[in-house]
Image (spheres, rainbow, N blue to C red):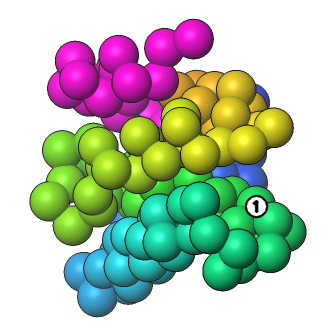
Amino acid sequence: LTCTAFPFAHRLGVALKAVSAEGKAVLAELCNACCGMIDRSKGKAVLPEPSVDLYRHVMVGCIILYDRSANSGAFSSREVAIVKCCTTAKKRGGVDTAKLCSALKYCTVNFSTAPERVQSLLED
């Protein structure tokens, strides 16, 4: 048994490792779709703020789960548009920007090996 600060994310990540590549692709697709919805709502009253807030949290949650389930992690994956998603979390995170960036930094397993560009995007 491993002691972690985020036991649910850890156990779910372990369980998802056994899932087929299609299951991980669904996480990546959901993440990218949420990111796209947030970007499309920029400067427009297309989506109500509660919906945009939900998309932000789902996007970050999918990155965390994908990172814990994929052997190479989310930050080196070509399936997740990681730079776009991190930029969206940073610039369009609303009142939760700091929380979303912290979740990406501290709840993922592979952030320490993320490209320098991604790490600098999430700095305070």
- In the displayed structure, 117 sits above or below 99; it is above
> Mark 1 packing: few (<14 Cα in 10 Å), some, or many (20+)?
some
Give the mark count: 1
Residue, x 59% and y 31% (percent of image)? Answer: 101
| Rendering coords of residue 41 (x, y %) | 58, 69
Nearer to us in this view, 119 or 21: 119
Say which quarter of the image contains residue 86. top left
Can residue 1 be spotted in the picture?
no
| Rendering coords of residue 2 (x, y %) | 63, 36
Residue, x 63% and y 27% (percent of image)? Answer: 102
From the image, which quarter does the C terminus lie in?
top right
Residue, x 47% and y 63% (percent of image)? Answer: 39
Report the side of 77 relative to 100 (left or right).
Answer: left
Check if residue 48 falls in the magenta segment: no
Nearer to us in this view, 15 or 59: 59
Q: Which residue is mark 1?
A: 53
- In the displayed structure, 27 sits above or below 8; it is below
Q: Amino acid at mark 1?
A: Asp
- In the displayed structure, 122 sits above or below 70; it is above
| Rendering coords of residue 105 (x, y %) | 52, 27
Residue, x 41% and y 40% (percent of image)? Answer: 87
Secondary structure type for disc 1: helix
Question: Which segment is the magenta one?
Answer: 107-124
Can residue 56 be spotted in the picture?
yes
Check if residue 114 falls in the magenta segment: yes
Nearer to us in this view, 27 or 88: 88
Nearer to us in this view, 63 or 82: 82
| Rendering coords of residue 16 (x, y %) | 46, 70
